[in-house]
Amino acid sequence: MSAAEFLQAEDAYFSTNPPPKQLAAHTALAEAFITQHVAANRRVVLVTSGGTTVPLEKNTVRFIDNFSAGTRGATSAEYFLSAGYAVIFLHRQFSLLPYSRHYSHSTDCLLDLLSEDADGRVAVRPDDSDRILEVLRKYQSARRNNTLLLLPFVTIGDYLHELRAVARLMAPLGSSGLLYLAAAVSDFFVPPERLSEHKIQSTNIIEKLYPKDKDSKTPSPPIEDEETFDNFDASPRVPRSKRLIIDLDPVPKFLKTLVEGWAPLGMIVSFKLETDPRILVHKARYSLERYQHHLVVGNLLSTRKWEVVFVAPGREDQWLRVPRHGGWGDAEGRPLRPDEAPEGDPEEEIEALIIPAVAELHDAHIAKSNSIEKK
Ligand code: 9Z3
């Protein structure tokens, strides 16, 4: 695809897929946030996190979703904050958030950590106090210094509009801007021209009872012909015309546009998710060559908390791994097979290894672009 064709595809997508209602408000918040931290000489990272939905109706009752709870993004954001970055956290609404992730959802429910004293006052149970205090201090520091900006999205369309807006705001930061794209982005969607306005019906009985005028209050004599279908008819032999067939278009790959147009000097890190270990590194390398960005972090669905691979231009692939029982043995240098995935969660978070390694590459990226500028 030529540069002109990319621009055309971008225009076509963004002019036909409506922006989220909060886009202008989010853009203003992000702009003020970036200005504040640039003035304080602080690096800014955009972290994307969680899954994007694909609505099947404009008035959305049903949508396609994916598995991501936003663990990678929320955990990474905490380590970026600890490393001194200001973080714009573009996340799926209600997915895990930095700090509160430790006590939300079903693991470590906050209520289980509280108790009532003799005077009816609520207190943290003494055994849990130290670990809560550690998280609380970091959370309060981020609040006090305004180093964490939370921007929620829901659909794939919202996500792409928000990503473009924030990436463009980061362009003036040059090489000190970092984009860390951990959100699980849908590859397929229903384009607006094929999106049903209202809830998709499992019966056309209304049209059959009120064939002339849907607003009429008096039903016509029902027409029960071959075209009538309702949801009592669910045998495997139902004709195709009575099934719901979802026809999805590919989501345009905007990583190229991001790299070339939206934030051309920033460092861009994307994630590649696969389930088949045999293709992970090839797909990561292919993505890097295709989009010409700076780092692809490859991970497998089943082992993503235990190991990731860094694929970057001009470097050997580098596996990062957190310790597991029995060590890594022969597995050194090759990804775990899905059936070798350890049970439960690792004791050490792999983001504790990922973020310092990304920050080091970011240092090198800045140094390289400074030396090019001087020449
Ligand atoms: C990832 O690969 C993330 O690491 C996970 C994190 C989604 C696996 P969890 O939320 O999972 O911690 O449970 N994200 C990126 C996957 C993706 O959609 N990549 C796209 C692509 O490769 C866009 S850059 O085309």
Image (cartoon, rainbow, N blue to C red):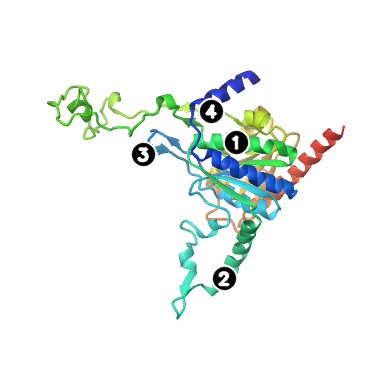
The amino acid marked with disc number 4 is: Phe
**Occupied quadrant, residue 141:** bottom right
The amino acid marked with disc number 1 is: Ala
Callout 2 secondary element: helix
Callout 4 secondary element: helix
* Front of the two marks 2 and 4: 4
CA gap between label 4 and label 1 equals 11 Å
Give the left or right position of residue 261, taking residue 8 as reference. Answer: right
Of mark 1 and mark 2, the one earlier in the sequence is 2
Residue 264 appears in the rendering: yes
The crowd level at tag 1 (other Cα within 10 Å; few <14, some 14-19, many 20+) is: some
- Of residue 181 and residue 150, the one placed in the foreground of this image is 150
- Of residue 362 and residue 282, the one placed in the foreground of this image is 362
Of mark 2 and mark 3, the one earlier in the sequence is 3
Residue designated by label 3: 61
Coordinates of residue 247 in the picture (x, y in percent)? 41, 26
The crowd level at tag 3 (other Cα within 10 Å; few <14, some 14-19, many 20+) is: few
Residue designated by label 2: 129
Q: Quadrant of the C terminus?
A: top right
CA gap between label 3 and label 4 equals 23 Å
Of mark 3 and mark 4, the one earlier in the sequence is 4
Coordinates of residue 301 in the picture (x, y in percent)? 54, 43
**Occupied quadrant, residue 274:** top right
Residue designated by label 1: 165
Q: How many marks?
A: 4
The amino acid marked with disc number 2 is: Ser
Residue designated by label 4: 14
